Image (cartoon, rainbow, N blue to C red):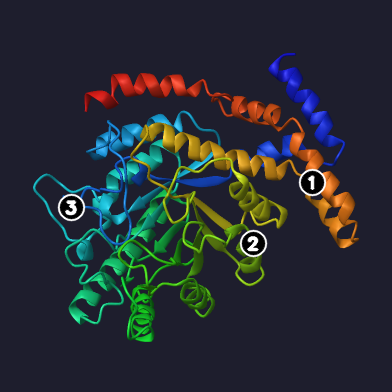
């Protein structure tokens, strides 16, 4: 059978259980997913030469790391040519592009320092998401930023957050697409603190000061992201899950919660948290990663939890309520491949969720036909999803199988190994 014949056979099979594969592909191809720039250079950025600090770490030394804005953009160009669906660009503030000989500290950043990224976005007709960078900087004092008891330190980082609000507004106005601006810090303590509430109150008040900077919530979507722990802050983090959720819940119309599925205890799953938050929040945001034992930021795969997260978004009709972004950084493998595998895996998960007879399965559950529900859930696991995926990729103009990797190997030989 030809690829087209295989797809037509699969389409008919799915139609018998109430799934419209044509509709699924049409929806998915216009659904934006943010592609994170920091996979390409191991979260180094362009505004400092020091090590990566602040509770996170990148491991590996695979050749070909991007060292300049031009190299990073070229690498992202290559990735965009290999992935199906609609991309959005995700930037950290540390990726500001300054004039030769210029240095502007993070509290004084301006939209002009990101003009070249806007040009990149316009070239691809995509939007931009943004993240203040509260790490890898000499003004992180004793591991603290927005929760620091030192007023000068705290004010520096508040001004950085305000500058990022202004830059986010600039991105939204220049691209015509809302900018999701995520606030996350690694603030915390290595061992058991004597005061847990004090740092959190300072953190709360600092975020409120950042959000006092004028912005249009229809264009700028601030988020507060939680984390359970980090390297060097194993005992306490100011921005715990309870803190982030409570802050977002008590500041409606100002910000939303962001969940990173590597930022919880190993037995917690974000797939279960998504429908819980959708009961209360008009919009939520996700950073999609793959934790192994901890927040290790491995490349996203088409694994169980990735598929479950996608299912919860789709089955709850929340595609227009959830802002989705990838977030991982693996320096031990080819970085172009890491980006491509992760993005394609999340696209697969979303498409499979759309090819699930969700209404039928909900009805079986509501009628307590649990035996039949289990039988049906197991049956659809072996449906010919791969043929739908191949058709979707073909319509997006990219390879449906792993032949895209040949282009990556050639790019590595021609470009990456010569850096």
Label 3: which secondary element = loop
Question: Residue furthest toward the left?
Answer: 101
Q: For the residues marked 1 and 3, what is the alpha-carbon distance in whole angstroms? A: 51 Å
Q: Which mark is residue 139?
A: none
Mark 1 Cα within 10 Å, few/some/many (few <14, many 20+)? few
- Asked if labels 3 and 1 touch by Cβ distance under 8 angstroms, the answer is no
Looking at the rendered image, the quarter that the C terminus falls into is top left
Q: Position of residue 384 (x, y in %)?
A: 74, 30
The location of residue 202, given as percent across then percent down, is 33, 82
Which disc is residue 48 wearing?
A: 3
Q: Which mark is residue 272?
A: 2
The answer to whether 385 appears left or right of 186 in the picture is right
Disc 2 versus disc 3: distance between alpha carbons?
A: 39 Å
Q: CA distance from mark 1 to mark 2?
A: 18 Å
Residue 147, position as x, y percentages in the image: 31, 77
Vertically, is 94 above or below 11? below
**Where is residue 53, by image quadrant?**
bottom left
Foreground mark, 2 or 3?
2
């Amino acid at each position: 059978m030809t690829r087209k014949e295989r797809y037509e056979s699969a389409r008919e099979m799915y139609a018998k259980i109430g799934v419209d594969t044509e509709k699924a592909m049409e929806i998915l191809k216009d659904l934006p997913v943010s592609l994170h720039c920091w996979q390409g250079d191991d979260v180094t950025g362009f505004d400092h030469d020091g090590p990566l600090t602040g509770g996170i770490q990148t491991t590996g030394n695979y050749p070909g790391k991007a060292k300049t804005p031009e190299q990073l953009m070229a690498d992202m160009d290559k990735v965009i040519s290999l992935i199906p669906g609609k991309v959005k660009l995700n930037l950290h503030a540390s990726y500001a592009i300054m004039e030769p000989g210029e240095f502007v500290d993070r509290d004084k950043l301006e939209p002009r320092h990101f003009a070249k990224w806007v040009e990149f976005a316009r070239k691809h007709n995509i939007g931009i998401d943004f993240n203040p960078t509260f790490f890898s900087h000499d003004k992180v004092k004793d591991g603290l930023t927005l929760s620091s008891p030192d007023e000068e330190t705290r004010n520096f980082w508040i001004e950085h957050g305000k500058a990022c609000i202004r830059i986010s507004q600039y991105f939204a106005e220049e691209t015509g697409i809302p900018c999701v601006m995520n606030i996350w810090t690694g603030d915390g303590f290595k061992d058991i603190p004597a005061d847990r509430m004090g740092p959190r109150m300072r953190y709360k008040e600092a975020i409120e000061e950042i959000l006092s900077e004028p912005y249009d919530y229809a264009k700028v979507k601030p988020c507060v992201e939680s984390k359970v722990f980090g390297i060097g802050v194993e005992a306490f983090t100011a921005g715990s899950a309870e803190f982030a959720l409570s802050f977002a819940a008590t500041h409606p119309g100002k910000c939303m919660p962001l969940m990173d599925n590597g930022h919880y205890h190993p037995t917690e799953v974000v797939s279960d948290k998504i429908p819980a938050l959708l009961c209360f929040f008009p919009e939520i945001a996700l950073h999609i990663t793959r934790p192994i034992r901890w927040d290790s930021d491995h490349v996203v795969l088409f694994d169980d939890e990735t598929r479950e997260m996608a299912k919860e978004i789709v089955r709850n009709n929340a595609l227009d309520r959830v802002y989705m972004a990838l977030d991982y950084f693996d320096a031990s493998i080819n970085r172009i491949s890491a980006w491509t595998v992760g993005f394609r895996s999340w696209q697969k998960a979303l498409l499979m969720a759309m090819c699930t007879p969700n209404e039928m399965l909900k009805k079986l559950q509501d009628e307590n036909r649990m035996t039949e529900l289990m039988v049906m859930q197991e049956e659809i696991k072996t449906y010919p999803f791969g043929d739908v995926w191949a058709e979707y990729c073909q319509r997006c103009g990219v390879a449906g199988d792993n032949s895209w990797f040949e282009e990556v190997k050639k790019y590595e030989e021609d470009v990456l190994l010569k850096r």
